[in-house]
Amino acid sequence: MGESTVTTSLEGREQAVPAPVTAAQRPGPLQRLRTARRPRLWFEILLIAVSYWTYSLIRNAVPEQRAEALRNADWIWRMEQHLGIAVEESVNHGVNAVTWLIVGMNYYYATLHFVLTLTVLVWLYRAHPGRYGAARTALFATTAVALVGYYLYPLAPPRLMNGNDFIDTVVVHQTWGSMASGDLKNMSNQYAAMPSMHIGWSLWCGLTIFTLAKLPWVRILGLLYPTATLIVIVATANHFWLDAVGGMICLAFGYAVTRTWSGAFPHALPRQPAPRQAAPRQPAPRP
């Protein structure tokens, strides 16, 4: 991105003068869009707020097809039993027996995926501005494709299934925060369990921390976060194991979009954004 120079003579001394940037050297509009730039704080705050509002609006506008969602839940449960991984009910009952643990998991489920995702975005903005845009694009693309899943494959969470003994831990322990149970359930689509964005977002956070953090223990915590989230979504009976697989597939799509657009995964991009191209200089008029 550096400018080439030409050498001129001035009163017996040589000077390096930046060569003018010609029209042929200037990047085109698409290339300028794909080049990482330093993010603008006001724009990012507005973009995140509008994007989350749009996501919530669309997610909750998807028709709550209860009968189909319950049929799909029964199919998922039978499939997991066939695969030998249908342990959600045992995990749900086992963790529910430890009151302090399940209450903590209820609050974890309700809050941490918002808090930590925003924290990682702020950290990227401040410490890795050259990688921020690509990482944010991966997160947004992941969330966008999840909306397609909610529309095409309505799915009831285990706690809403008929004929099973799953425990709705928010109702039983009367904890606050989950928009999937209790007093807030009418504000959220109850049959949008596939894919799990708790897993999609937490795995995005975990991979971002693991690939960019310097301290080894922080990188390990990054990997433990989506692992803990997986246990939480199952223990609270909000998701099946296979919902988590759906979230991972959405994240893979999000990273593929970023790789195609930016030419590299976020961690492989420069930490600092490229400097802006200098404007062409007009030649000085001859005397």
Image (spheres, rainbow, N blue to C red):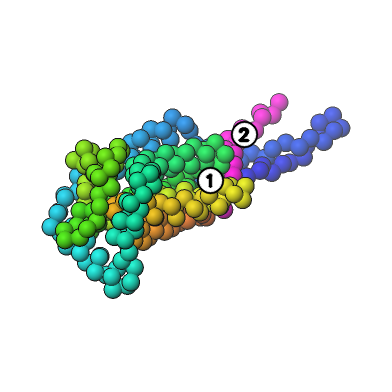
What's the residue at 14%, 54% (across, down)? Answer: 66
Tell whether 200 sits left or right of 14.
Answer: left
Tell whether 51 sits left or right of 75.
Answer: right
The residue indicated by pointer 1 is 131
Q: Within the image, what quadrant is residue 260 found in?
A: bottom left
Q: Position of residue 140 (x, y in %)?
A: 38, 47
Q: Position of residue 206 (x, y in %)?
A: 48, 51
Q: Position of residue 17 (x, y in %)?
A: 72, 36
**Is residue 115 positioned above or below 253 on the image?**
above
Secondary element at image label 1: helix
Asked whether residue 128 is drawn in magenta, I would say no
Q: Nearer the viewer, mark 2 or mark 1?
A: 1
Q: Earlier in the sequence, mark 2 or mark 1?
A: 1
Q: Within the image, what quadrant is residue 49 found in?
A: top left
Which mark is drawn over residue 281? Answer: 2
**Is residue 47 positioned above or below 90 on the image?**
above
| Residue type, mark 1 in image | Arg
What's the residue at 28%, 73% (across, down)? Answer: 82
Secondary element at image label 2: loop
Do we see residue 275 in this rendering? yes
Q: Nearer the viewer, residue 281 or 74?
A: 74
Q: Which span is picked out in magenta? A: 267-287
**Is residue 228 positioned above or below 281 on the image?**
below
Tell whether 165 sits left or right of 268.
Answer: left
Which mark is drawn over residue 250? Answer: none
Q: Position of residue 216 (x, y in %)?
A: 61, 50
